[in-house]
Image: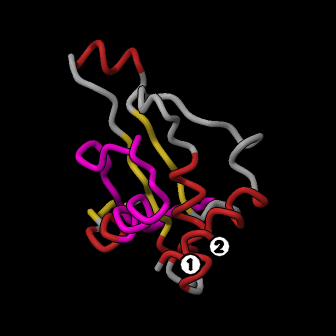
Amino acid sequence: MIKYEYAPEIKSKVLHICSKLDFKHVDMNRVACFRSFGSSSNNTIARCHALSTIWQKTLNTKAHYIIEVLSEKYDRLSEDEKEKTLIHELMHVPKSFGGGFRHHDYVCDKNVVILHKKYKNSK
């Protein structure tokens, strides 16, 4: 069974990345970060979840996003790879911040590397 824990240290990193990369569209008041334990996923390091439009209407709320890091994979990464992973997940959040996702035609290794370099240079 998968266990989930709030991950304030991940939220802090995400906040820092968003500020340095000028991701103003990401409303950090509506982003939660979790660390999960016990996933059987083989190739997944992290996931971005969104509150879809139908759930927003049902709950009468705005879009929210969750960044989940899979502890078994994420925790073993170097700091650079952790940063790239979080950048990758943040890139899935569209400018509209409406509950949808940007797809892998935009969220690709090439673009992650470009943004990671920009992030490293702005530290």
Residue 1 inside the magenta-drawn segment: no
Q: Residues within 10 Å of mark 1 (few under 14, many from 20)?
A: few
Tell how many labels.
2
Q: Is residue 117 left or right of residue 38?
A: right
Q: Position of residue 32 (x, y in %)?
A: 30, 52
Q: Residues within 10 Å of mark 2 (few under 14, many from 20)?
A: few
Amino acid residing under circle 1: Lys
Looking at the image, which is closer to me, 58 or 30?
30
Residue at image coords 45%, 50%: 23
Residue 9 lies, with reference to residue 105, above or below; the image says below
Q: Circle 1 sits in a helix, a strand or a loop, which is it?
A: helix
Q: Position of residue 58 (x, y in %)?
A: 27, 14
Looking at the image, which is closer to me, 74 or 105?
105
Q: Quadrant of the N terminus?
A: bottom left
Residue holding disc 1: 120
Residue at image coords 34%, 29%: 63
Residue 62 lies, with reference to residue 119, above or below; the image says above
Q: Position of residue 86 (x, y in %)?
A: 52, 63
Q: Circle 2 sits in a helix, a strand or a loop, which is it?
A: helix
Residue at image coords 22%, 19%: 59
Residue at image coords 39%, 15%: 54
Instruction: Write down the quadrant of residue 77 in the picture.
Output: bottom right
Residues at discs 2 and 1 in contact (Cβ within 8 Å): yes
Residue holding disc 2: 117
- Magenta residues, as a range? 13-42
Amino acid residing under circle 2: Lys
